[in-house]
Every structure is written in structure tokens, then in C-alpha cells.
Image (cartoon, helix red, strand yellow):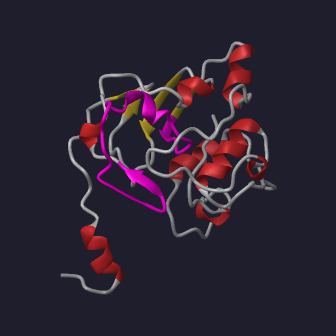
């Protein structure tokens, strides 16, 4: 079992820091029954590159430097070997649970003629009606060697839905209203 957490610091878990202000009894118990590492290094301090490095064993900067934006394509080059593929070759069953954030082939399920609702530096933003949610979404965890997957692409990016293996559990039907974020950033809370 590999637990890979965003924004989790070394001193956040009680098993590494008895003075931690965050109660982590289950993770502490798991750590007490398994192996703990104290000299770990990450290819990047942000999620997409660090996940890529864990799964491929490669420095992310050999291939890319950014995170995957909403509805972004997979970061993996065709034929790139991954940890779950190696494990599968040796008879292990694998599953990924949680945030993927390494891209999917969203173009494969986009409806012909669909138009983005907006676009900017991060790319096009698509409404939920732009996709055929009954189709499997290629290019995700199953295409990278995992036998099963349950999670989301990125919790704060569209399409705002849970994905089981390569299909959405319930089709998204609304676009997040981000118009209030600008006001909040500027200090206008009403």
C-alpha cells in the first residue's frame, strides 16, 4: 500500500511527530505495522509532476513542467512503463483510489460540435453537456496499468464527478459558479 497525500508534511503525522496538532491515529497505527521512510525526495512540490515521478520513476522535467489543467490530456508518453504495470507483470492486482490529476483523453468522449463555455490561460472550460458520459474515458489509470480506479480527476476542476475505473458514476449536470471567487479575492464577501 502506497499512500500519497497532497499537502501532507513530514511532521503532520503523529508517528513522525508526537507533537503534531493533527490527529492521525489510523495512519499512525498503519505506520507502526509497516515500513516508514525518513529520507524521501520528490521530483516536484506540486501534484501532477510528483505523481508522474512516483508512477514512472522518472524526473518529471524530462517530459513536462506543469500540472494538468481541467480536461487536460494524459502526461504519459505512449509506451511509458509505470509502477502498476511492473507490478501486474509480477502477478499483483493494483488499484488507485483518490485524485488522479495526470490527464485523461477527454477528446474521445467530447460530443461533435461541442463548444467550450470559456477559455483562458489554463485552456478551454467545457460544460457538462459537451461530453457523452455513457462512454468510457480512455487514457486514465486503467491505461497506465491499474486494474481498478475510484476517485476524481481533480476535486476542484471540472468535470466534478466520481469516476469508477474508466466511467463516471453519475454524469455531472452543472458547471461550478466561480464568479464569486474574484469578489472574495478582492475582499468583497457579500
Relative image position of residue 169 (x, y in whole percent): 31, 29
Nearest the camera: 77 or 37? 77
Q: Is residue 138 visible?
A: yes
Relative image position of residue 82 (x, y in whole percent): 71, 30
Nearest the camera: 39 or 140? 140
Residue at 50%, 35% in the rendered image: 104
Q: Is residue 27 above or below residue 82?
A: below
Relative image position of residue 189 (x, y in whole percent): 23, 82
Name the residue at the right extreme: 39
Nearest the camera: 43 or 26? 43
Q: Is residue 162 above or below residue 17?
A: above
Q: Is residue 103 magenta?
A: yes
Count of marks placed on residues:
0
Residue at 49%, 60% in the rendered image: 23
Nearest the camera: 162 or 72? 72
The answer to which image quadrant residue 133 occupies is: top left
Relative image position of residue 32 (x, y in whole percent): 66, 45
Residue extent of the magenta highlight: 97-125
Q: Is residue 29 above or below residue 38?
A: above
Location of the C terminus (image quadrant):
bottom left
Residue at 49%, 52% in the rendered image: 69
Q: Is residue 50 magenta?
A: no
Location of the N terminus (image quadrant):
top right
Amino acid at each position: 500500500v502506497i499512500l500519497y497525500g497532497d499537502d501532507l508534511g513530514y511532521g503532520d503525522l503523529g508517528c513522525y511527530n508526537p507533537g503534531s496538532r493533527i490527529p492521525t491515529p489510523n495512519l499512525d497505527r498503519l505506520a507502526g505495522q509497516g515500513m516508514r521512510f525518513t529520507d524521501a525526495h520528490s521530483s516536484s512540490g506540486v501534484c501532477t509532476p510528483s505523481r508522474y515521478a512516483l508512477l514512472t520513476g522518472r524526473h518529471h522535467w524530462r517530459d513536462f513542467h506543469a500540472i494538468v489543467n481541467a480536461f487536460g490530456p494524459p502526461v504519459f508518453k505512449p509506451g511509458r512503463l509505470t509502477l502498476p504495470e511492473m507490478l501486474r507483470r509480477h502477478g499483483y492486482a493494483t488499484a488507485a483510489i483518490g485524485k488522479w490529476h495526470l490527464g485523461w483523453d477527454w477528446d474521445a468522449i467530447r460530443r461533435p460540435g461541442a463548444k467550450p463555455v470559456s477559455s483562458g490561460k489554463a485552456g478551454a472550460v467545457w460544460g457538462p453537456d459537451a461530453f457523452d458520459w455513457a462512454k468510457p474515458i480512455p487514457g486514465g489509470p486503467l491505461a497506465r496499468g491499474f486494474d481498478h480506479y475510484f476517485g476524481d480527476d481533480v476535486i476542484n476542476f471540472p468535470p466534478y464527478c466520481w469516476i469508477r475505473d474508466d466511467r463516471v458514476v453519475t454524469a455531472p449536470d452543472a458547471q461550478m459558479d466561480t464568479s464569486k471567487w474574484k469578489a472574495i479575492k478582492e475582499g468583497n464577501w457579500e
